[in-house]
Amino acid sequence: MATIPLETTSAEQQKEKTGLGNYFIANYPPFSFWKPDYLSEAKKALESPPTPNTPLGLYLHIPFCRKRCKFCYFRVYTDKNAKDIEVYLDALVKEVSILAQQPVVAGRPWDYVYFGGGTPSYLSAKQLQSLMERLQEIKPWDQAREVTFECEPGTLQKPKLETLRKLGVTRISLGVENFKPEILQYNGRAHLEEEIHRAFGWARELEFPQINVDLIAGMVGEDWENWRDCVRKTIALSPDSVTIYQMELPYNTVFSKEAKELGADEPRLAIADWPTKRAWVEYAFKTFCEAGYEVSSTVTVVKKKTQFVYRDALWRGADMFGTGVASFGHINGVHIQNLDTWEAYIDKLNHGELPLGRAFPTTPRDRLIREMVLQLKEGHLDDRYFQQKFGVDILQEFAPVLQKLQDEGWLERRSDKIQMTPAGLLQVDRHLPNFFDPQYISQRYT
């Protein structure tokens, strides 16, 4: 993917500093349009039969961490004791139990299960075994194509990984982010490099079907020499897949608050500009491909035949219960987010009610555009898929936008397919709003 000149500075770089706000597109319509006023639509979606042949997934938000990363914008807690954790896990099990009884389930098996965070591996082996056994009693995941569990390397011990393997986890995702101690420490990460190698070795020894490693391009303190070293060390581990995120600065992070207080030009907060971060990802993609990987999306390289069921299902309209505080889901065409405070979430479930916070009912056109912009992050679209599912010829319906992006060199049209160019894929998120309907443009994303 040699399309962006490496290690250069230019006028473009000066214009593309990493500012405050969300850059990456994770859903459509934007979250800022989701409202409590639409909760009646969410309840109706849960009480209706499912759309035939739609997979059903389960996301479980485990919001506990040893430390809060300075770039993190998720709802996480670093101050909860063992009793608090038990209260939360009891509430989480109640939520899944209530959801499993909704008419939209109608005997559907889990297609995928995802334990995200926060830090799911913050829980002890005993807590994990209790949680997973209770969840399996409600609705087993033995038919699921994928059960993913996110881990922070420093929270892992071999018995904990043995518990996960025994209880059906098929995919471990290690939040490595970087290998250099100074960068990890300054950015708020709690683990050390030796813990990465130790945890990865245990996971390989236990023969998890898939091990993923997360990296972040552009953490504060990053430079070319260290980034090359991170890529080299990751290749030496030989994970089945690697996700490489580019650092952004959403409004509610420690770094963004410091930037407001100290000024965006404060040297200690220097985050690489977007052209540099794209160059780092380009270098990583090229180097991983030389080592036998292939590019799977704007953030992913994989060994051949490695799949991401969670991603692929969601980006193709699957249903998903998003459980846990502040968690996001999608059911029967309605986006849903849970209440986003600990107290409100726990209280609702203590009263036997679902902790729904806000929602957004989508139209067929909303769902079409949502799948288009998400699948473009894989680098290509197939017009036949959209013809069959939505009855829309996207090559004609979006011809002006496609022509504009083609003229600018970001994509190519090939008979019934759309293919992002290498440069287009590296910065696809900046182009996705071109496909948004007018009423969803020029609004804050979250």
Image: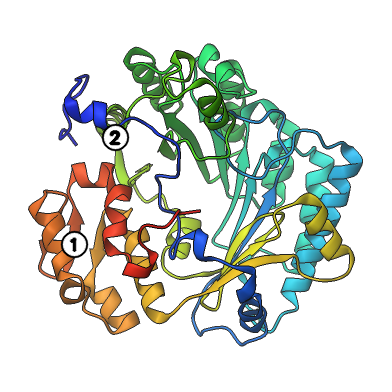
As drawn, the residue found furthest toward the right would be 83
Residue 111 drawn at (x, y percent):
56, 67
Horizontal relation, residue 413 to residue 165: left or right: left
348 up-or-down from 325: above or below: below
Horizontal relation, residue 163 to residue 70: left or right: right
Residue visible at 55% across and 78% down in the picture: 332
* Callout 1 crowding tier (Cα within 10 Å): few <14, some 14–19, many ≥20: many
Residue visible at 47% across and 20% down in the picture: 269
Residue 268 drawn at (x, y percent):
48, 15
Q: Quadrant of residue 238?
A: top left
Does residue 437 appear in this view? Answer: no
Q: Earlier in the sequence, mark 1 or mark 2?
A: 2
Which residue carries the number 2 mark?
285
Could you say which is closer to the camera, residue 303 or residue 134?
134
Could you say which is closer to the camera, residue 356 or residue 155?
356
Q: Secondary structure at mark 2?
A: helix
Amino acid type shown at disc 1: Ile
The circle on residue 429 is: none
Could you say which is closer to the camera, residue 214 or residue 26?
26
109 up-or-down from 199: above or below: below
Horizontal relation, residue 50 to residue 342: left or right: left
The circle on residue 418 is: 1
Mark whose residue sits in front, 1 or 2: 1
Horizontal relation, residue 414 to residue 191: left or right: left
Does residue 115 appear in this view? Answer: yes
Residue 16 drawn at (x, y percent):
28, 33
Residue 333 drawn at (x, y percent):
51, 77
* Callout 2 crowding tier (Cα within 10 Å): few <14, some 14–19, many ≥20: many
140 up-or-down from 75: above or below: below
Q: Quadrant of residue 85?
A: top right
